[in-house]
Image (cartoon, helix red, strand yellow):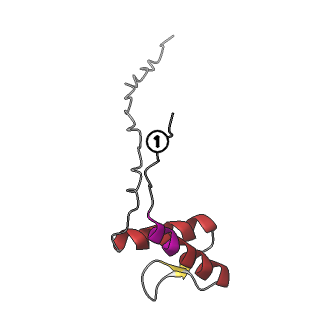
Amino acid sequence: MARKAKKRRYSKSSGKEVESEMRRYKKGTAKSGRGGKGGRVKSRKQAIAIGLSKARKKGKKVPKKAKKTTKKKTSKRKSSKKKSSKKRSS
């Protein structure tokens, strides 16, 4: 029984984009954010994410960003009944 070939999730060229970004990160020249305002990239994960986003902008085959699923908090309203403190007259 022949094995079914797996479909590539990332294109080879997008991998090259990540490689070049990692090289910049290791040199210490990788920057995040906008032009002059960008700070230094501090983690490997951040460098990989920047490389992938650059590949995405160039239109290379890269999966879409995973959407963050946040749970909506249902606010429970507690009706606080104030105890009426009546003074006892003796």
Please state the horizontal and vertical placement of residue 52, each as a whole percent of the image: 46, 67
Q: Which residue: 39% across, 50% down?
A: 67
Q: Which residue: 55% across, 78% down?
A: 20
Height in image: 10 above or below 21?
Answer: above
Q: Which residue: 44% across, 64% down?
A: 11
Residue that numbered label 1 is attached to: 4
Q: What segment carries the magenta color?
A: 11-17
Mark 1 is on which residue type? Lys
In this orientation, which residue lies closer to the viewer: 31 or 8? 8
Please state the horizontal and vertical placement of residue 82, each as a whole percent of the image: 41, 24
Q: Main secondary structure of the magenta part?
A: helix
For label 1, the SS is loop
In this orientation, which residue lies closer to the viewer: 33 or 23? 23
Any magenta on residue 22? no
Please state the horizontal and vertical placement of residue 79, each as a whole percent of the image: 37, 24
Q: Which residue: 63% across, 73% down?
A: 42
